[in-house]
Amino acid sequence: MDQTIIGIIGMGLMGKMYARKLSAAGWRVHACDTRDKLEVLEQEFSGIPGIVIYEDGYGVSRSSDYIIYSVEAEAIDKVVAQYGRATKKHAIVGGQTSCKAPEVAAFERHLPSDVEIVSCHSLHGPNVDPKDQPLVIIRHRASQESYDLVRKVLLCFGSKMVVLTAEEHDRITADTQAVTHAAFLSMGTAWRANNQFPWELTRYVGGIENVKCNITLRIYSNKWHVYAGLAILNPSAKKQIRQYAESVTDLYKLMLGGHKRELENRIKTAGRVVFDAAGREGEPLMLSDEALDQFSLGKVPKERTPNNHLSLLAMVDCWWKLRIVPYDHMICSTPLFRLWLGVTEYLFRNPALLDESINTAIEDHTFRSDDLEFTFAARGWSDCVSFGDFSSYRDRFEQIQSYFAPRFPEATRVGNEMIRVLVEKT
C-alpha cells in the first residue's frame, strides 16, 4: 500500500465506518470530530492500526492527501469554511453528504484553487454492508490521476461505483430517497398519534406490513439529519415530497367520499403508466409476500387483515404525477428504496390484491383513523420541508423517535436480516 493519507472530518456513524474500512484495507487514516469528542474517539480507535485521531480539522487538513468531509449537509458550509483554507497543497477533497449542491458550493467558496474536488456518497446506512451497494463518485474538479486515486481508495468497500455529476446525483437521490423517507416518517407519525405499536396489532403483521414496520423503525433509529438535509436542501426533493402529500390527500378524499370508480380509475391509470413504462410485464416480482412473512416483529395471524395500503397507492400516484419511472435509477438505489419499490410492485402487479385494496378503501373503515393521521402527517412533513425548517424537522423526528426507542434493538436486528436476505433477491 502506498503512503497516501486519508483524512476524515466528521466521525459520526458513517465517518467511523469509512475509517474502519479504509484502515482494514491498509490505508493510513487521520480523523477528527468536534473537540469535545476527542477523548472518546481516542479510546474507541486506540487499538486499530493506521488510524490517528486529531483534535480538530486543521491537523487533518494539513496532513492528509485525500480529505473526506463526513458531516451533515446543513453544516457543510460552516465546517469547510472553518478548515478548508488549511487544506494541504494539491490535496483532493470530497464530501459524503446526501445533497451535493450545498457541498460543492461550499468547496468552491472556501477551498484554495490548487485543491482538487472528487466527492462520493455511499447510498446505504452505516450498519449495512457496503459490498455491492451503490457508491456514487463525482469528479467535479480533478485531474485523471487524482480521480484514479480516489477510485483506488474506495475500492476497499466492494461497492458498485456509479459516476455522476452533482446535479445528476441530487436528482436521482430525490427520485429514490426523498418520497420513500417521507412515507415512512409519516407512518411513524400516524402510529404515534394513535398511540400504537403497530406490530402488536394483528392488522399490521405479515407480508407487506413487515416492511412498513421494520423500515419505519429503522429510519427513526437513525439521526434526524440523515434525512433532513436531503429533504430540505434538495430542490427536487421538496417538489416530490409536496406531490406525495397531495397524492395522499387526494386519494384519502376519494375514499372518504366513497368515490370508488374515480379512485379505481386513478389508481389503475397510475399503475399502468408507472409499471408499463418500465416494461415490467412478464418480469418476475422483486419480492413475494411469502418471503416477507418471516420478518415479522409480532405473531403472524392465520388470516391477513385486508388493508387499503394508502401509503403505497399514493407512492405510485406521486410517481405518475411527476413522470418518474422508479426502475430507471436502480443502480443508484438504497436498500430501503428497493424494498419499498418491491412491495409497491407486488401490490400493483397483483390484480386481485389491488382490487382488494381499492374495495377496502371504500367499504372497510378498519384503517380509517390511521389513514386520517397518515394524511395529516404527510402534509405536516411536506410543510416542514417546504419551509426549510431544520429545527421543526428535528423536533418532529425526535419526539416520534423517543416513542419507538424501546423497540429499536429488536427492530434493527430483524431489519438488518430482512435487508440482507431480500436485497439479494432484487
Image (cartoon, helix red, strand yellow):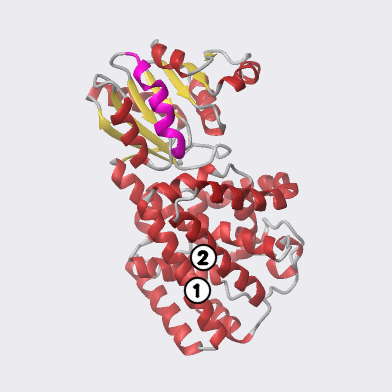
Q: Residue sitting at 40 percent across and 56 percent down?
A: 238
Residue 2: horizontal and vertical position, in percent?
38, 12
Residue 132 x, y percent position in the rendering = 45, 40
Instruction: Report the span colored magenta.
Output: 73-88
Q: In terms of sequence position, does the residue under pointer 1 or pointer 2 come before the other?
A: 1
The answer to whether 103 appears left or right of 295 in the picture is left
Q: At 40% across and 52% down in the image, what residue appears?
A: 174
Amino acid type assigned to the residue bearing label 1 in the image: Thr
The answer to whether residue 426 is visible is no
Q: Nearer the viewer, residue 243 or 131?
A: 243
- Label 1 sits on a secondary structure element that is helix
State the mark number for residue 379: 2
Residue 81 among magenta residues? yes
Q: Quadrant of residue 216?
A: bottom right
Residue drawn at (46%, 23%) of the image = 8
Q: Position of residue 90 (x, y in %)?
A: 28, 16
Check disc 1 and report the residue beneath it: 249
